[in-house]
Image: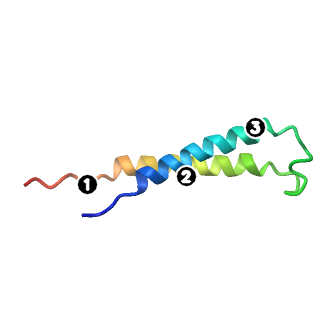
Amino acid sequence: MGVDIKLPIGLMFTVFGVILSIHGLITASDPELYKRSLNININLWAGIFMLVFGILMLIFSKKLKKPEAEK
């Protein structure tokens, strides 16, 4: 009996990715906020990567399910 953590990990990264991407879009016009990160909107980019990773994990959790053994 194995534990499949792809679904909760995918959900967590998808939710955090959406939140961080929205925050990055809202604060995109504030150059003072992103001065320390060489004027790169790090919130937006990290949110996009987290969102993509979360969606991939959700896809893998749906596609790679093993059929249940019949008793």
Q: Residue 21 in the image: x percent, y percent?
A: 68, 42
Q: Quadrant of residue 22?
A: top right
Say what amino acid the circle numbered 1 marks. Answer: Lys
Q: Nearer the viewer, residue 14 or 66?
A: 14
Q: Residue 25 in the image: x percent, y percent?
A: 75, 37
Label 3: which residue?
25
Q: Residue 59 in the image: x percent, y percent?
A: 43, 47
Q: Nearer the viewer, residue 21 or 56?
A: 21
Crowding around mark 3 (Cα neighbors within 10 Å: few <14, some 14 to 19, many 20+) is few
Scheme of colours in the image: rainbow
- The alpha-carbon separation of the residues under discs 1 and 2 comes to 22 Å
Q: Residue 60 in the image: x percent, y percent?
A: 41, 51
Label 1: which residue?
66
Q: Nearer the viewer, residue 60 or 23?
A: 23
- Tell me the element at label 3: helix
Left or right? Give the position of 43 relative to 60: right
Q: Which mark is residue 41?
A: none
Q: Quadrant of residue 28?
A: top right
Q: Quadrant of residue 20?
A: top right
- Pointer 1 or 2: first along the chain: 2
Q: Nearer the viewer, mark 1 or mark 3?
A: 3
Q: Determine contact: label 2, label 3, CB under 8 Å.
A: no
Label 2: which residue?
53
Q: Determine contact: label 1, label 3, CB under 8 Å.
A: no
Quarter of the picture holding the N terminus: bottom left
Say what amino acid the circle numbered 2 marks. Answer: Phe
Quarter of the picture holding the C terminus: bottom left
Left or right? Give the position of 40 relative to 5: right
Say what amino acid the circle numbered 3 marks. Answer: Leu
At x 55%, y 45%, the residue is 14
